Amino acid sequence: MTLSLALTPADWLNLFVHYLSLSLLAVGGAITTAPDMHRFLVERQQWLTDPQFNASIAIAQAAPGPNVLFIALMGWNVGLNAGGLPTALMGMTIAMLGIMIPSTTLTYFAATWGHRNRELRAVRAFKQGMAPIVIALLIATGWILATGTGYDVRNWPIWAVAVVSALVVWRTKVHLLWLLGAGALLGWFGLV
């Protein structure tokens, strides 16, 4: 399902500025800002539908290459909803430039400084303190993706598979493909 939008230059600037600000919040990768992207693109602006949002993430994660491609797909879908191929290309470009420019610039300068000062106590403390924040942002992203696709929180088998999979990944060296295959089989037989 696509939407029919009429975006003004101010709307395109708003999209660019929103991605500029999200870029600086993308600690742990762009995927950690997906909940705020959902809030902005689907709930507030209504430039994307829930299925378009989820499909953008799913397709980009399944495709080879960097996982930041989901942002290009979201921009592409906003552009398609606003008028077709030229606007889709513009939406994709605006979203990618918005998310990439601040974070790559800041990362370059921070990494250069951090490498020069890696023995400082503050630098080590900062690195250790960021780990729980990244984990919390990833959990929030998983929650948005799971509940936005109609998975009911009371559907305990799905959540049990997710928890068991997380524990197996954390505590063992089992390859992720085995877990994906096991999840596919559980789904095939209708157990989850």
Image (cartoon, rainbow, N blue to C red):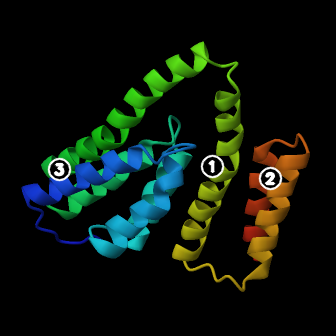
Location of residue 106 with respect to 160 vertically, above or below: above
Query: Of callouts 2 and 1, which one flags the residue occurring earlier in the amino acid sequence?
Result: 1
The foreground one among 179 and 46 is 46
The residue located at (72%, 86%) in the rendering is 154
Q: Which residue is mark 2?
A: 179
Residue 168, percent across and down?
87, 52
Residue 185 percent across, percent down from the top left: 78, 63
Helix, strand or loop for disc 3: helix
Q: Nearer the viewer, mark 2 or mark 1?
A: 1
Q: For the point 40% across and 60% down, which residue is it?
A: 37
Q: Which residue is mark 3?
A: 85
N-term mark: 3 or 1: 3
- Quadrant for the N terminus, please: bottom left
Foreground: disc 3 or disc 1: 1
Which residue is labeled 1 in the image?
Answer: 134
- Give the residue type that dot 1 points to: Val
> Could you say whether the residue bearing mark 2 is in a helix, strand or loop?
helix
- Total marks in image: 3
Residue name at image x 11 percent, y 58 percent = 10
